Amino acid sequence: MSPRTNDNATPDADKATPEENTAGAGPAEDAVDTPPDGGTLDATPDEGTVDATPVEGTVDATPDEGARAATPAGETAGEDGADDPSGSGSGSGDAGDERGAAVRRLSRSQHRWRAAQLGFCAAALAVAMTAGAVVLGALRDGATTPAVAAVSNGVSPQLLASGDLDASILSLQAHLRTQPKDFGGWATLGLAYVEQARTKGDPSRYPQAQEALNRSLKLRPDYDPALAGRAALAAARHDFAGALKYADLALRQNPYSERALSSRIDALVELGRYDEASKAADLADSRRPGVPVFTRYAYVHELRGDVKTARRVLKQALDTATSRGDISYVTSALGQLAWNQGDYHSALAYYARALAADDNYLPALEGRARTQAALGDRAAAIKGMELVVQRYPLPQPLVELGELYEARGAAGDERKAHDQYKLVNAWIALAHAYGVNADLDTALAAADHGDHRAALTAARAEWARRHTVHTADALGWALHVSGRDAEALPYARQATATGYRNASFLYHLGVIERANGHADKGRSALRAALDLNPGFSPLGAREARKALEAAK
């Protein structure tokens, strides 16, 4: 599990081995706009697919079209990946036009760097599709190769532990061109694609991951590493019901699968079933103690407000970490935990250690910039976050960079901030095109920087699927910005009810309490937010201070 609820990171980022899968999730929760104490329902996906259906009103264009549409005028994104047998070559022309229109609004910018930034989003998708099609398309021609029943030494689980995921994938592709019946190789490749999508912010890898994992299961039904891979893929697409389903299927085949045990914890966490997640963490710890389980165990405790135990267990995980991926992952989790508590100097030290192990590790780059902003070093924070979004234009860092521009307020910063928020919309559209449910991203970004109606629609949809502290906070805040403060209050209170120490949640609660006429409770929550993490947001912290000053 990731150090943050919606990250779905592979704790052992270097080792996407077929035996041990990470990120996971679980059954959907209750109906739209049901109060926080409402009932639940089962929403298990069809056995044959974990593809998320794009929500109403979202883009559903083909990956090829999306990549081309997102390329600024006069630039090319790359080949179209027509040989990809994953079924990603069909889609709606109208949807492609819709996404293209959104992207073209960006390309009208007079500044080339902004167009180039958007072009990176598209180019990454196009290049990834083309590379993935190489192996999948080539293997169509080799379908008559005699079956190879066992995993070859050429695709040993240690293959992906070298630290260079791209090179490992190329090696796997070369191996599978000659051994297309190697079910273990396909499972490893599928997991590697999921990890590559996560670390590079590239959802175009997901159809290729699904194709590779399906091929593995076709060659050997009930192969637990491939089932665990399907759990990872479903979680990466935010299909948490599907993730829990596939984790359970994998555990039926192998009760000691570290990846499936880890996925099951993730599943229950992502659905707000925290008591069950705690029991699942205890079970996993008894069966397969190690870095993946320790990090999940720590997060379950953090969500309950037990920061001391979370820190202790993460340090224990770090003591056992040996690979660069493990070290980067665990130290970044410790950095985020420290930042959440306002311990910025410790956070910087942990992020520095993570980057010493892997100087391109996204959570550490992002966390370092966030911490620099909290310490008042805005210039370094902006430079660092610009580097992050140039490499990985994902919603959270795009929003944070936009807010840093707004907080600085220099000439042209308002326009720069607006461009970041537009890029969030472009990324969400592209993610939907590859089967990723991005409703939580939509709700969080749109509530503060977009269409309030879109924020509320997305937040309600996500709440209907799962009840977590994060979805409660998102729905409460979306209701507030829509002027529905009485409805917002129960959700804002639920977001802080587990003891989870999150300054943004406390800030939202304080604002909503005050809007409902509860002045004392509002002041208390706002003070708690600033006492906990005084630099929790470039704009939110400033607004919290203004509100407290006005209340004097």
Image (spheres, rainbow, N blue to C red):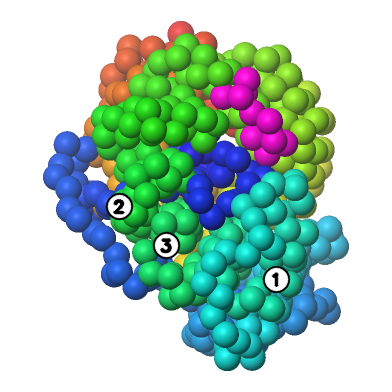
| Label 2: few (<14), some (14–19) or many (≥20) C-alpha neighbours in 10 Å | some
Instruction: Kindly identify which numbered label has been placed on residue 175.
Output: 1
User: In x, y percent, where is residue 132?
Assistant: 66, 73
Crowding around mark 1 (Cα neighbors within 10 Å: few <14, some 14 to 19, many 20+) is: some
Q: Which residues are magenta?
A: 317-328
Q: Nearer the viewer, residue 73 or 200?
A: 200
* Residue at 29%, 30% in the rendered image: 279
Q: CA distance from mark 3 to mark 1?
A: 20 Å
Report the residue marked by disc 3.
223
Q: Residue at x 81, y 63 (%)?
A: 116
Residue 205 in which image quadrant:
bottom right
Check if residue 176 falls in the magenta segment.
no
Depth check, front residue: 212 or 30: 212
Q: Is residue 97 above or below residue 380?
A: below
Mark 2 falls on what kind of element?
Answer: helix
The percent coordinates of residue 478 (x first, y second) are 38, 44
Number of callouts: 3
Horizontally, residue 202 falls left or right of residue 457, namely right
Q: Is residue 336 above or below residue 410?
A: above
